[in-house]
Each structure stands twice: as structure tokens, then as C-alpha cells.
Image (cartoon, rainbow, N blue to C red):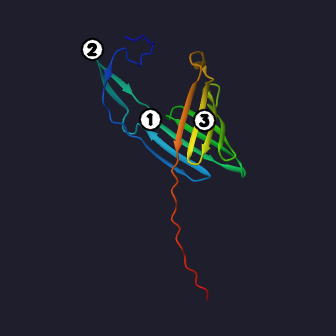
Amino acid sequence: GVVHNDNFLPNNLQQGVAPDFSFGIYFNNDRYFAGASINHIALSSTSVKSESGGKTKLNFSRNIFFMGGYDFKVSNKFSIMPSAMVKTDLKKVQLDLGLTTTIINNIIAGISFRGYTKNTIDALALVLGFKYKGLQLVYSYDANLSYLSKFNTGSHEISLSYRYPFKKKESRGYFYHN
């Protein structure tokens, strides 16, 4: 077995099946984005069987997320997008604040901060990326600012995405001069 000193994690193999439902809605255009989501709608707990035949009950917290951002065009080649995400389980609230800049319409640089009081400060993220046509490559590094920094030196994330452009059909109108 594994000794990890965490009572919520089992020391042996466990298995279980439980349906889980989430819902979210997201709106965006060239200037802004906004969204909301909720997870674990129908599921609050489930039981899992261990190798030895015992059962463990796992409890899931329902989480609600709200997010939004707006892209301010400073010039033809420079824009700033502040954004925010509020996360809550209806007991505690956590806030993520971010600021992303786009330079020459293809270089992405940003910073994000998670937490808002001395008890909820968690991380600072630095973001750097590149866009070319529909392709986007982004790297971010999260540096822990909480007590977890004693055990974790941070995390790295690389994301690659491609946005396929959909062309809108233009309807041709007819003009009658009279």
C-alpha cells in the first residue's frame, strides 16, 4: 500500500461507478466572453468498494463558476483583456483575476492571480503564447503563493488549439431606385 497520510485517499485499489451531471453556458464574440457552470448537480455522494471488500463513502461538493472578460483594443496592434472567475461551493468563495495582452495580433502575454484575502491567496500564473491564423500555442507557469509552496514548486501547462473559421453567408440584397 501507499502511505500518503491523507484520510480521504484510499491506501488500496478501489472501484465504483456513479453518474455525474454538470451544466454550463458560454457566450462570446470578438470583444467579450461570459459563462456560468455548475458541477455535481445530481450527485452528492457515492460508495466505492475496496480490494478487501469494504466500502468507502465519497462526498462531492457542488461547485458554481462564473467568468467573464472584455477585450479593450488600445490600438490596431495592441489589446488588453481583463478577466475574472468566481468559484464557490456556497461555503467558500475564490476569485481569479487575470490580465492578458495581445501584441501585434499574435503574441500573447498575461498574468493571473488566484485569491483575494490572506487566507485564500493561492497562486500567481504567468502566461506566454503565440497565435498564427487559427493556431494558438500557450505556455503558463503557476507559482504557488500559499502554504503549499513548501511542497510544490509550481506547475507548467502547455495548450495547443486551432480555431476553424466559419464563414458567414452574405445575403445579397436588391436595391430599387425610384
Write the residue at 59% across / 15% down. 150
Query: In the rendered image of this protein, does residue 39 appear above or below residue 78?
Result: above
Q: Residue 62 carries which label?
A: 1
Foreground mark, 1 or 3, reads 3
Q: Position of 7 compared to 72: left or right?
A: left
- The amino acid type found where label 2 is placed reads Ser
Q: Position of 131 compared to 168: left or right?
A: right
Instruction: Report crowding for label 1: few under 14, some 14 to 19, many 20 or more residues within 10 A (C-alpha).
Output: some
Foreground mark, 1 or 2, reads 2
Q: How far apart are marks 1 and 3 (CA)?
A: 19 Å
Q: Where is residue 153 in the image (x, y as percent from the top left)?
A: 59, 19
Q: Which of marks 1 and 2 is nearer the N terminus?
A: 2
Mark 2 secondary-structure assignment:
loop
- The amino acid type found where label 1 is placed reads Arg
Write the residue at 42% across / 10% down. 3
Write the residue at 66% across / 37% down. 110
* Foreground pick, 25 / 120: 25
Q: Residue 52 carries which label?
A: 2
Residue identifier under label 3: 96
User: Considering the image in quadrants, where does the C terminus appear?
Assistant: bottom right
